[in-house]
Amino acid sequence: MNKENYVKGLVSIITPCYNGERFIKETIDSVESQTYPNWEMLIIDDGSTDNSEKIVNQYVEKDSRIKLIKQKNAGSAAARNNGIRHAQGQYIALLDSDDIWLPEFLNDQIGFMSEKKAFCVCSSYRRIDENSDETLSPVIAKPVITLKDMEAIDYIGCLTGLYDCSKYGKVFLHTELKSLLDDYEYWIDVIKLSGTAYGNQKILAKYRVRKNSLTGNKKKLISKHYKFYRTVLKQNVIKSCISVGKWAVNGFQKYRV
């Protein structure tokens, strides 16, 4: 997390893509529609076998701010880290290849960061289904997010998080966690640096809820979170059970119709 050279005011958008041909156009279009023009979008093709590369290259040829990085399939954490290593911007943002930003996302978030004199910010977001229709209710960002708040619940919607790497340097994901909530640990690491993140109450993004997000094995999810609290956050058995309970209640509230 050492400080490195960066381009002041530039936002580096890190987008891992694995077989994302169905939604990647919408994602890129949402970035190109930003009212804040000073950005670069690093799309990391994580060994896709569909037409993702061809689609992305059509944008690369027309917009020099969009860059394609290819790698053998290694998972989203490794892909994000690859993008972060190549990032040149003062600000780092993670945007998955099926999610969408509203046109004012970057402009509002950078202004909000300046207003709060913050190192890290996030925002509220809507949820859409696989047909891009709104589903469920919006997720409203917690106004102030502390490290203690993050002990049981990840309050930062990954697609809305933004931090200033000019202060403490770049933050990387833990690839050794594989699929064990690596993005959750990432935002914990970010907040550890300053102690606090701020949540913009404005709805500035759209998170795509895929079918497997709602119909996954609930027992497996509970086990995954318990293991994360015990092995990654080093919580004792009682605290881990309490954290699982808090996570479950929060999840019920987020996904009830």
Image (cartoon, helix red, strand yellow):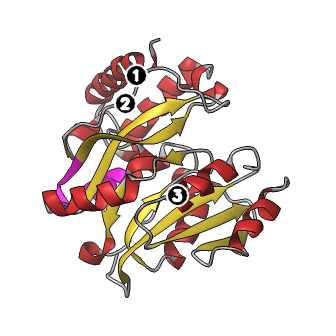
Q: Please identify the residue farthest to the top as the structure is shown.
A: 257
Question: Which amino acid type is shown beneath numbered disc 1?
Answer: Lys
Magenta stretch? 187-198
Task: Report the residue marked by disc 3.
Answer: 33
Give residue 93's position: percent from left, percent from top: 43, 60
Indicate whether residue 152 is drawn in magenta: no
Residue closest to the eye, 85 or 181 = 85
Element type at mark 2: loop
Task: Determine whether, in the image, residue 212 is placed left or right of residue 47.
Answer: left
Seen in the picture, residue 13 relative to 217 is either above or below; the reply is below
- Is residue 171 in view? no
User: Which numbered disc flags the more N-terminal residue, 1 or 3?
Assistant: 3
Task: Determine whether, in the image, residue 181 is placed left or right of residue 9.
Answer: right
Between marks 3 and 2 in the image, the one whose residue lies nearer the viewer: 3
Task: Report the residue marked by disc 2.
Answer: 139
Q: Is mark 1 in CB contact (under 8 Å) with mark 2? A: yes
Q: Residue at x 30, y 40 (%)?
A: 202
